[in-house]
Image: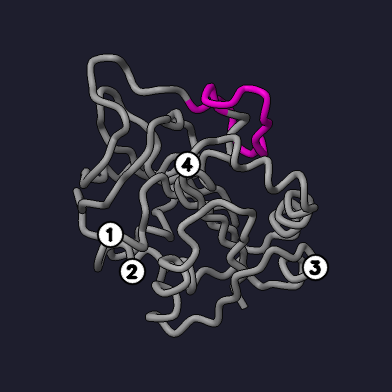
Amino acid sequence: MIAIVDYGAGNLNSVKKAFDYLGAKVLVTAQPEVVATANKIVLPGVGHFSALGGLDNTGLRDAVLQGARAHKPFLGICLGMQWLFEGSDEAPEFVGAGIFAGRCRPFPSSVKSPHVGWNSLAVREASAGESSRLLRNVAPASFVYYTHSFQAPVVAATTAASEYGAQFSAVVEQENIFGVQFHPEKSWTVGLLILKNFCEVQC
């Protein structure tokens, strides 16, 4: 069972419908005990970084991190991916999971913010020299759909980047931890393939 974490912010119905279409067994839940018993965890999110405070107020943060430490496959989507970093300049008082080093920053003033619409993926080799499991069978330079005002830095775990004023992390992967800055549930066949790949991940 895949638990989709409901902490009060996120495009939950669209994410669930995408997994339903793939035939996956999913449950939207705000209960830490349900997250703790799930086989896989998905943390979606849209909006302001401060919305992630909903994880702290409900006990969901501990449940999600315990699942990640237990090597359960975890997927952060948009705001959920940004949470994997140390934090964001959008809400400096809120602490991220710190799984990846660095903070999320605003886009340079040379481009319009927010970054909304389709952009291409530049696939990178993972730091361990392994090919991306999340992007398996995804064609090079495939387009995905974005809507965000802050960007995550490119790190060793970045397996795909996009360009908008500068390069930023589009996909991060490290062992059982996965994150995508774009919205796979809005990215048509490419997004569905990425979600299918996550469903098939074994850790």
Along the polypeptide, which appears first: circle 1 or circle 3?
3
Q: Distance between the residues labelled 2 and 4?
A: 22 Å
Label 1 sits on what residue type?
Answer: Ser
The amino acid type of the residue labelled 4 equals: Gly
Q: Is the magenta stretch mostly helix, strand or loop?
A: loop
**Residue shown at the point (60%, 35%) measured from the top left:** 50
- From the viewer's perspective, is residue 99 above or below residue 21? above
Q: Give the range drawn in magenta.
A: 88-104
Give the class, few, some or many, for how many residues have Cα within 10 Å of label 1's Cα (few <14, many ≥20). Answer: some
Residue at numbered disc 3: 33
| Amino acid at dot 3 | Glu
Is 94 within the magenta? yes
Secondary structure state at the residue bearing disc 3: helix
Q: Is mark 4 on a helix, strand or loop?
A: loop
Alpha carbon separation for disc pair 3 and 2: 28 Å
Picture disc at residue 192: 2
Whole-Å distance between the Cαs marked 4 and 1?
18 Å
The residue closer to the viewer here, 58 or 176, is: 58
What residue is at 26 percent from the left and 52 percent from the top?
144
Residue in view at x 77 percent, y 46 percent:
57
- In this picture the colour scheme is one colour
